Image (cartoon, grey):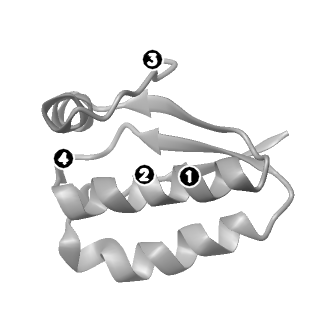
């Protein structure tokens, strides 16, 4: 079983701190995590760095991490930054 974490429409450096707190709470749970990025309309490098760090933390804890649905904006930002992602949709 896994938990789904919904990203907001705006994923910028301003939102990194509050979402860091929320994502960090997921690391203490015993469940795998799916990120739903379908609503993302704006994202910057700082937020993608947060997601990369989160993915690495989960990996070290032996938990699975994946992306569910992703907006085109999110996919393009990841592609531009060289962050490989394999969304389910």
**Quick check: marks 4 and 2 in contact, CB under 8 Å?**
no
Residue 23, located in which quarter of the rendered image?
bottom right
Task: For marks 3 and 4, give the CA distance.
Answer: 17 Å
Closer to the chain start, of discs 2 and 3, is 2
**Residues under labels 3 and 1: Cα distance?**
22 Å
Mark 4 and mark 2 lie on one chain; the one further toward the N terminus is: 4
Left or right side of 47 for 57: right
Cβ–Cβ under 8 Å for marks 3 and 4: no
Rendered image: mark on residue 47: none
The residue that mark 2 highlights is: 52
Please say if the residues under marks 2 and 1 sit with CB atoms less than 8 Å apart.
yes
Residue linked to disc 1: 56
Between disc 3 and disc 1, the foreground one is 1
SS state under label 4: loop
Q: Which mark, by number, is residue 89?
A: 3
Q: How many marks?
A: 4
Circle 1: element type: helix
Question: Label 4 belongs to which residue?
Answer: 41
């Amino acid at each position: 079983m896994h938990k789904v974490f919904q990203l907001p429409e705006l994923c910028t450096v301003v939102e990194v701190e509050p979402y860091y707190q929320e994502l960090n709470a997921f690391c203490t749970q015993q469940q795998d995590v799916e990120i739903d990025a379908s609503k993302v309309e704006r994202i910057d490098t700082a937020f993608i760095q947060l997601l990369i760090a989160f993915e690495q933390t989960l990996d070290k804890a032996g938990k699975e991490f994946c992306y569910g649905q992703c907006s085109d904006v999110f996919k393009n930002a990841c592609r531009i930054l060289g962050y490989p992602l394999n969304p389910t949709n």
